[in-house]
Image (spheres, grey):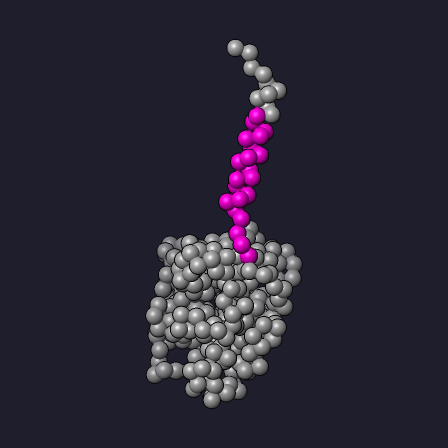
Amino acid sequence: MRIDWKHYAVLLLTCVASVSQGAEALLYRELEPMEQYVPRVDGDTKFSNTYRYWKDRAKLDPTLAGNPEEFWRLNWKFMDPPFNQAVHGGHFALDHGEERYQSLNQSGAFAKCLGARKGNLKGLRASYPRYLANLGHVAGLEEVIERCAAKEGVVMQNGSYENSAISLYIASKSNGMPLRIDVSKGPMKQAYERGRTLYHTKSGRLNFACASCHIHNIGKHLRGNTVTSPFSDASHFPVYRTRYVLQSLQLRMIECQLDTGAQPLMPGSSASTDLEVFLTALSNGYPIAVPSERD
């Protein structure tokens, strides 16, 4: 049997083109209208314009905090320290995180692995997520905690209570310091742009994007809650949630993904970290405040 190789080649190329077009169709996702952001906390003025109400935690309007129809304008800042509901669960997590950190850092190697200068944790949380040359990618603090604990022979899984408690303790050493990640160039800029796209990508049973609620419907009621601005949110994580005990920012994103019927992203995945970079950039300039509580 003689094979017509010219005809075979044309047929093969046609099949490849068809499969490629099918793959593109499968990869298509509808986007919320893409927004341009100023990667600072005061960029909120373009969207909810609630920044004026919560930009200074020391001057929050108590009449808004006590009004169930208005407290959303404070972006929950009245639940940040010095808020103390007779000592909420975040304080216990903080104490536990300190114990676990000290046990891992007996030689000082754990702190060094995390990037602490001379073992000093002050300011460390304010610079995460960051690009790490030894990993070759952008990483969040919880991912690095997991990796550094493994070097000490301890399993400290990203997303676990133990990991988040250590992250909370580390964050507490930067209380009052503004978040300050640079997304103007290099891998951090690339991660920021990927995160921005993901933030506007619709998915799941409800076909929602993060921006569907937290940018284009701020102030509106959704499932018994009023949607708030994403600006400054990264400053209070890990946060004590009365329903879920303790959550890192990436775990909070997973909760939203489950609520909208979307396949949740794994903690520490590149996509989760890209979203964290984007959200943290929207909190640039806002001071860290832990332990905080949210419903």
Residue 166 percent location from the top left of the image: 41, 66
Residue 89 percent location from the top left of the image: 34, 74
Q: Is residue 27 above or below residue 35?
A: above
Name the residue rendered at 53%, 48% in the picture.
28
Residue 188, visible in the rendered structure = no
Q: Is residue 187 left or right of residue 166?
A: right
The quadrant where residue 167 appears: bottom left
Q: How many marks?
A: 0
Residue situated in front as seen by the camera: 120 or 19: 19
Q: Quadrant of the C terminus?
A: bottom left
Name the residue rendered at 62%, 66% in the picture.
37
Q: Single out the residue that lies furthest toward the bottom.
A: 63
Q: Single out the residue that lies furthest toward the top.
A: 1
Q: Which residues are magenta?
A: 11-31
Residue situated in front as seen by the camera: 186 or 198: 198
Residue situated in front as seen by the camera: 252 or 167: 252
Magenta stretch containing residue 16, yes or no?
yes
| Helix, strand or loop: magenta stretch | helix
Name the residue rendered at 47%, 86% in the picture.
64
Residue 73, visible in the rendered structure = yes
Residue 42 percent location from the top left of the image: 60, 75
Q: Is residue 192 above or below residue 241?
A: above
Magenta stretch containing residue 91, yes or no?
no
Residue 206 percent location from the top left of the image: 44, 59
Name the residue rendered at 54%, 68% in the picture.
216
